[in-house]
Image (cartoon, rainbow, N blue to C red):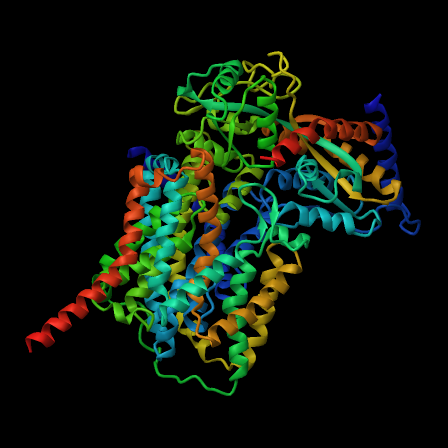
Amino acid sequence: MRTTTTALFAGTALLAAGMSMATPAHAEWPEKPIRVIVPFGPGGTSDQVTRTFQIAIQENDILPQPINVLNVGGHYSVGARQVMEAEPDGYTFLTLHIALMGGEAGGMLDFGYRDFEPVATTGQFCLTPVVRKDSGFDTVDDLLAAAAAEPDSLLFGANLGAINHMAGIMLQNSEPDAEFRFVQIGGGTANFTALTGAQINASVLSAAEVINFTKLPDGSDNPEAQIKPLAYTGPERNPKLPDLPTMNELGRDVEFCVDSWWFAPKGTPAEAIEGFAAALEAAAQTEAVQTFYEERTFNPIFLAGDALAASLDETWERIEPVAKQAGQQ
Amino acid sequence: MEGVLTGLVGGLAIVFTPMGFFYVALGTILGISVGAIPGLSGAMLIALTLPLTYYMPATDAIVLLIGMYVGSITGGLITATLLRMPGTPSNVMTTFDGYPMARAGKPGRALGLGIAASFAGGIISWWFLLLLAKPLSIWATRFGPFEYFTLILMAMVLIASVSQGSLIKGLIAGLLGMLVSMPGVDPSSGMPRLTFDTYHMNSGLKLLPVLIGVFAVSQIIADVLDIGRKIERVESTKSSIMIKAGDWVRHGGNMLRSGLIGTLVGILPGVGASIGSVIAYTTAKNVSKTPEQFGKGSEEGIVASETANNATVGGALIPLIAMGIPGSVIDAILIGALMIHSIQPGPTLFITNPDIVYAMIAACLIGNLVMLAVMTGSVNWVAKLAYIPRTFMLPVIIVCCVIGAFGLDNVMFDVWVMLIFGVIGFLLERARYPLGPFVIGFVLAPLMESKLRTGLMMTGGSITPIFTRPVAATFLAIAIILLVWPLVSEWRRRKAEAGTSAAG
């Protein structure tokens, strides 16, 4: 159902795009270049997702106007607020992820996803709890049993208030009395470093990071790796980590994936939102994006319209209490 | 060993294709040019170039960016020496001796020493990159928060020895710098603090706008106020800029020591070139026979600072290549560049993409050679910049400063920060508060704070590991010695004087 409606969108938008090229006098969205703000510096995952779509849309002539990607560095709230306050003319968009909800629920931001028009979700990546190979923990149960037996003793590396912190809290909440001691380490590579150096006991990494740090190119285990994954927080097993059980299989209600969201300022005309969503959906089918998803082990989901709105609300309900808990740390 | 050799030959073969060499040379020259323009920085050049490289083959893209990295650190030397405006934070120490020397009529000599030292630093760290990448980066993962904390504490203590004039004013300037670094998102809780409810302050006062303001804009204000003054031309720069064999011998020990310090500091993730040059500079001062010359145009000071900051480039590439861990801000951007080309930097990079690894290593070598050739060839001409009437120079520089402050993150707020800190820097100078300690305090305080708080989170509030962990305890001991030594030697000197006068 969802696919058919969005496919319909895509069709009409492509048609509209073709028509506007044929008759430029008859103004249709888009009639000038589109600006997408990435509220992070260049090189990060958000930047890579955005630019992969930019290239795919441009190289396949999906839209008649160019897309300009602008990195607004510093704290992500600065770029996000710029888009929120931008003129809702249909030519300014934002790419962001669950940090937006974490920031709102944790009390860091005085605005949130409801202050934007949602445009689309393009792909998601999921996480894996990791420990050292010599830790003696072979399963999530082992890890959480130890965290329950001696609360506040296992060091869990995280970027406090951010994605990996929220994931760690969801993990500990799945076992009564389990309690990690969360330590400010940083993002994925920083936690990998700290685990390799035996400075912390556990953390979460993205599936792509785990594959990169623990697998050889042919898919076998890298004997030199000091860390091992215990489970996967996606809805289904990851095809590149087939032996890794999902948290749901283990009877724990922990599903935590990071969606790539596209937003527009509140009040943006529906024509622009639907048109851009259709362009993104068409781009998601291109080889460039499919290869990107494959390499970064993203789930190739696509959501727009009502399905997206429902997914955002559902994510908020799950994340809000966790983010509140993270904010109180 | 044999594998290293074949790999290197393969890497050189990639870099020595016409396009490969073109990109390394282009990157290095662009890096030098951007580094030599006050206000523009290597990080900004690389950030702006990155989107363009998405359309290039992976090896070309990465050798271009590495060339820029090598070039920009060296280019900053030119303005640090001639205009007292460091191109990057790591050139701050070079201004202390390079500028007085240029002012004393020897800009060519100052630049020549800086270039030779930069090349030496680049090559020393390159050897480590080639031969010891893996064991060294594994060693670096053992560095916990308490080791970092004491290392940075040690560098902080060095503020006292780099401040000129009144020690008290130096310490006050250092503390002011630390204070200014505090606003923004709390590094250990993710919550905003001291932001005065302006959302722009969530990013804090960023390094680049503050640095450009304090050094470049303040200098512009000072220059505008005495615009009539002419700069005396003393040196004839006809003689060769290449330093002589005797200089290599005389400064060889200093280069080797500073190169080692720079490499080792560069390997540590998150601790950048500025700490490397501070430590090398003060070490050179402490072992020098003429420490009183430091800050007044000491050759050793220029050599130590420039060797160390260039050595951190190769040092910082070591954990990136061997482990996928960025050693500096620029390295983090390089990782993004690799990933966009579907190359995942990490422990298996040597297995998955040996061609890329050795192309990077080869690009690092060729970049240093190109840098030496370009800088030596153009320095006579570049040194004349010092004699261009300031009426022409200053408007161009202020435009570049505004572009530089805006261009990094595309936020106008940063331009205002830069201008305000220009005024603050100018006032501090007028009141004879040294700017060096201010900037060092500003750069190091956030790192020191976050490492200490991470450590305290790990131990549940206990500080004991800084005494019990051997590396941490060693750094702490060195810090204490550095703090106490000047006092002790002063006391002994006075006692000796008292003894002589009593005897006489």
Residue extending farthest to the right is: A26
Q: Above or below — where is B390 with respect to B207? A: below
Residue B307 appears anywhere in the view: yes
In which quadrant of the rendered image does the N terminus of chain B lie? top left
Position of B471 compared to A164: left or right? left
The residue positioned 31% from the left and 47% from the top of the image is: B476
Residue extending farthest to the front is: B502
Where on the picture, by quarter, is residue B349? top left
Residue A298 appears anywhere in the view: no
In which quadrant of the rendered image does the C terminus of chain B lie? bottom left
Q: Above or below — where is A185 with respect to B307? A: above
Residue extending farthest to the left is: B503
Where residue B152 appears, x then y in whole percent?
A: 39, 50
The residue positioned 34% from the left and 46% from the top of the image is: B264
Where residue B319 appears, x then y in whole percent?
A: 41, 39
Where residue A122 appears, x then y in whole percent?
A: 72, 32
Q: Above or below — where is B43 with respect to A144? A: below
**In-front residue for pair B432/A203:** B432
Where residue B314 appears, x then y in whole percent?
A: 38, 48
The residue positioned 76% from the left and 40% from the top of the image is: A263
Where on the picture, by quarter, is residue A286? top right
**In-front residue for pair B43/A153:** A153
Count every numbered label the image shows and give the total.
0
Q: Above or below — where is B211 with respect to A113? A: below
